[in-house]
Amino acid sequence: MRKSWDYQPRPRLSEEKKRRDALIALAERQGWVVGYQDEVWWSRVSQPNLHSWTEQGEPLRLQELKKEKTDPDPKALACYGMLSANTGRMYLRFVEGRPVSQVTTDFLEWLCEQAQAQSKRVLVLIWDNASWHVSKQVKTWLREHNQTVLQEAQTGKTGVRIIPCWLPIKSPWLNRIEPKWVHGKRAIVEPARLLTASELRQRVSDYFGCEQVELLQQKSRHSV
């Protein structure tokens, strides 16, 4: 017998999805852009789930990749990305370190520069509730950034405001950039040998049609 609560809706999930959809509709106006943002780790060692064919009676042999002690590159590379809902274009920045609040604000500042270069005035940013998205440092930066843009607009200077839209917890299907990571990892896989960090960054950039940009730097190893 089915329980009645099997059919209970998740009110907060529904409300957050409605807010996301409303912001997307607003962003159709001129000068606005919608971006789905997320971070991902690109592993040099671990392989994504793949399928392959082999001749009957001929076992498929897979080579386990290992990182040598003399290898100076890290096992995995952190990467920030944003998918433009307006154009489908991907914006990527690899990180020297890991995702933290300071790196997040550096990435947001860079995104605003990219949006301004395209004559955009507002960036609707859809992202999850990672700690480096909801931290006091990031929320303070967002508030101060938007205040500065509005103040400078009174003097005739243009800038890009950010309207953040935090998705419900544990709802990756609402973030359209997520499938991009899955397909990307399958597309750039190298089963025969270990890619260098430089090769991995180049393959990822080529797959998404992005120009390689200077690495974002994690300035403190104790950042959150």
Image (cartoon, rainbow, N blue to C red):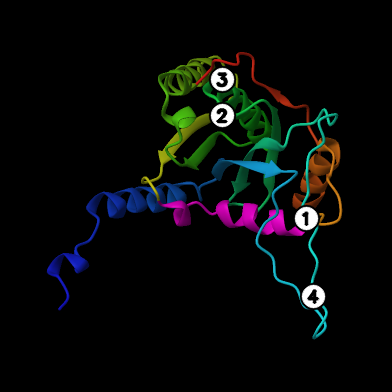
Which amino acid, mark 1? Val
What percent of the width, then of the height, locates residue 157? 60, 19
Q: Residues within 10 Å of mark 2 (few under 14, many from 20)?
A: many
| Residue at screen point 69% across, 43% down | 42
Q: CA distance from mark 1 to mark 4?
A: 20 Å
* Disc 2 + disc 4, Cβ < 8 Å: no
| Residue at screen point 77% across, 53% down | 64
Q: Which residue is mark 1?
A: 189
Q: Which residue is mark 4?
A: 59
In this rendering, position of residue 216 left or right of residue 85:
right
Q: CA distance from mark 3 to mark 4?
A: 49 Å
In this rendering, position of residue 67 left or right of residue 5:
right
The tag earlier along the polypeptide, 3 or 1, is: 3
Q: Main secondary structure of the magenta part?
A: helix
The tag earlier along the polypeptide, 3 or 2, is: 3
Q: Is residue 26 above or below residue 154?
A: below
Q: Is residue 211 above or below residue 11?
A: above
Which amino acid, mark 2? Val
